[in-house]
Image: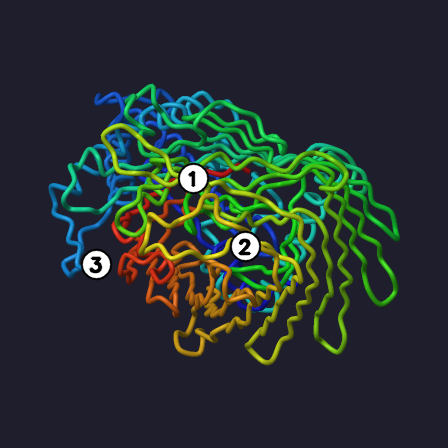
Amino acid sequence: MLSSARKHCANRLLQNYCACQYGVKIRLKILIYKYRLRFFAEFCLVRILALDCAHYVFQQPVKDVTYSSNKHIHNCLEMTEKLFVGTVAIKHHEKPLMTGLILSTQLLRLIFIKVIGILKPFLLIIAICAVLGTGLLKMPSVVFADDAIAESGAYEELDADSTEEFEEDSGEEESWALEEDWDDEFDEEGENTSSSPFTWRFECAFKNIIQTDREQHFEDAWKKNEISALFEFQYGTSDDYLFSLTGLYFFPTFINDTIGDDYEYSSSSKTYRNLRISSASSEIIFRELYYNWSREKFRVRIGNQIFGWGTADFMNSTSYFNPSDFRELLFKDEDQVALGVPAISGLFFFEAFTVETVFVPIHTAAAFPETGNYWAVKMVEDSYPLIFDDANPMDAVSKNFGYGVRIASTYEGVDFSFSGYHGPDNEPVLLPYSTVLIENQTVSILIDPQYFIVDYAGFDFAFTYEDFVFQVEAAYSPNKSGFIQQDTSQPQDLIFPYDTRKTDYLSYSVGFNYFIPMQKLLPGHAGESLFTIEWFQAQYFDDDIERPRITDFLTCRFQDAYFDDRVSISMTSIFETRSGGVVVWPKIGYDFQNGFDVEVGYVAIAGDGEGDYQKDSLFYYYKDNDFIMVNVKYAFP
């Protein structure tokens, strides 16, 4: 059911028509997506935006024969161009941003020209599709003033001439009429959706990483210019269906062959066991691809799957199956960190609890940055360059099968589960394997990611208290592998490869979410204000084993949305408490609520280090990797 505040908001939106200068009135349409209201305008300005994009690409006026007044078109183009430029360009800050970085006006202009230059093919495709009406962008639904009443019976009361009378009507009648129309429209859409055996969703994005190191040339600051497309579809009935979530990623090297020099998906063209097909400048990932078979008491899935076990928000100790994508350290989109694995899973429903079983017959390795990649560790001890070997999975034999089971239930408002696992560890041991001699370079160290069989037992629980949601998650292993430390101050005495040993291991996360009642501080605020804090620690019980590199992390995040969820902000901070590392990551985004979304963020990384690998902060090796991220996304429908 809709809250009274959102009903009122929808009511007010339906009362108001936006009128363009050329006399065209726009009908606002209301859609529901995942229990949240999103207000989309089916408006003819989509065509004008497309014309503006074409105008910007070709650098010459574009005429639209649909409209008779060239003056109005020119005015709309002018207004849209201002809007377009204002949302894409990074605004100038008078005060230092984060680490004191001040972007000059000239630098901003160069950034904008660079972004537009790379975006030209992307904008051209959108412009052609919008103007020709291919269906990639929904064509406008235009209602002329004289025909507004005849357009739909559900919108009779919203005629512009009767707006004042509409506002004077009783609130109860408005709410009742809106709810009836809403329910009828929603039921019709629901029936249409359920009757269709094929549903789909498409999303394309342009992502940029711009390093902020002042000492390097501006052309060298562009570390990643990636175009991506995400296609999700489901075919079948609600019980038996085929589901796919596929991502395509590539660098537009046809624009500039130097794009991608600092970021490679893979050192060579190869196909991985989970249908990840990679080359140096492109990649296809079948992140999820499975067949679902559901009945009243059980559900079975076969294929590439991602398992969301655990309650923690950032670090999941009981996420045993899916390897992680570390090619951008911790800065990939959260929904793209986990890689799917080929598996057979079954979820069984009992009266008081559920049981989920998972069988993984083929091991899949994690993804690490290639040697020389922007996110690869270049050197340790401030003296020894690192070379990373390929992360090869374990052999596909029966002794390397993975098994897991999870029992989940709820008791008096507390959600809890117990889980167990046996199989290949999804976290490899980054083993110093040998020294490498390269001509005219110092001695390098070869790092070989190796996998071992491990057993885990874990639990998690979460409960709500007023505006708080508390979460605890932990996993214990009696036989997790690690490598034994050596004294690196005497390099001549180092023995390669390092020895490994199995020992007891424990990792856990503790945190909470606080839903801030911002509407009490800001009357009329409709966004969801959320503050999250989480502590994560991992520890070997054997002191001779090299400690985990990701441990003793305190993560904090504040996120909120304003102006009908159009403007979103977030501030994420990661503190490595043991070694003095810190990451500060603010982001701001704007949702046009027509499929387009723009996001700008800045990442500042700092870490203490003394040239001692055993004491240095993990973030010490990335202290020069501060960057600006600029993302442009379009989703349909």
Instruction: Please tell me the numbered disc located at residue 97.
Output: 3
Mark 2: give few (<14), some (14-19) or many (20+) Cα within 10 Å: many
Residue at point 43%, 70% (across, down): 524
Mark 1: give few (<14), some (14-19) or many (20+) Cα within 10 Å: some
Q: Nearer the viewer, residue 504 or 434?
A: 434
Mark 3: give few (<14), some (14-19) or many (20+) Cα within 10 Å: few
Left or right: residue 158 versus residue 423 is left
Q: Nearer the viewer, mark 2 or mark 3?
A: 2
Instruction: Answer with mark 2 or mark 3, whichever residue precedes in sequence.
Output: 3
For the C terminus, give its image quadrant.
top right
Dot 1 corresponds to which residue?
A: 434
Q: Nearer the viewer, residue 537 or 489?
A: 489
> Which element carries disc 3, helix, strand or loop?
loop
Instruction: Answer with mark 1 or mark 2, whichever residue precedes in sequence.
Output: 1
Q: Nearer the viewer, residue 486 or 557?
A: 486
Q: Where residue 416 appears, x then y in whole percent?
A: 71, 69
Residue at point 41%, 54% (across, down): 566
Q: CA distance from mark 1 to mark 3?
A: 43 Å
Q: Where residue 145 appears, x then y in whole percent?
A: 44, 39
Q: Quadrant of residue 509?
A: bottom right
Whether residue 67 is situated above or below residue 28 in the rendered picture: above
The furthest residue to the front? 493
For the N terminus, give its image quadrant.
bottom right
Instruction: Please tell me the numbered disc located at residue 47.
Output: none
Q: CA distance from mark 1 to mark 2?
A: 17 Å
Q: Where residue 426 appears, x then y in whole percent?
A: 60, 48
- Amino acid at pointer 2: Gly
| Residue 304 at least partly seen | yes
- Amino acid at pointer 1: Ser
Dot 2 corresponds to which residue?
A: 482
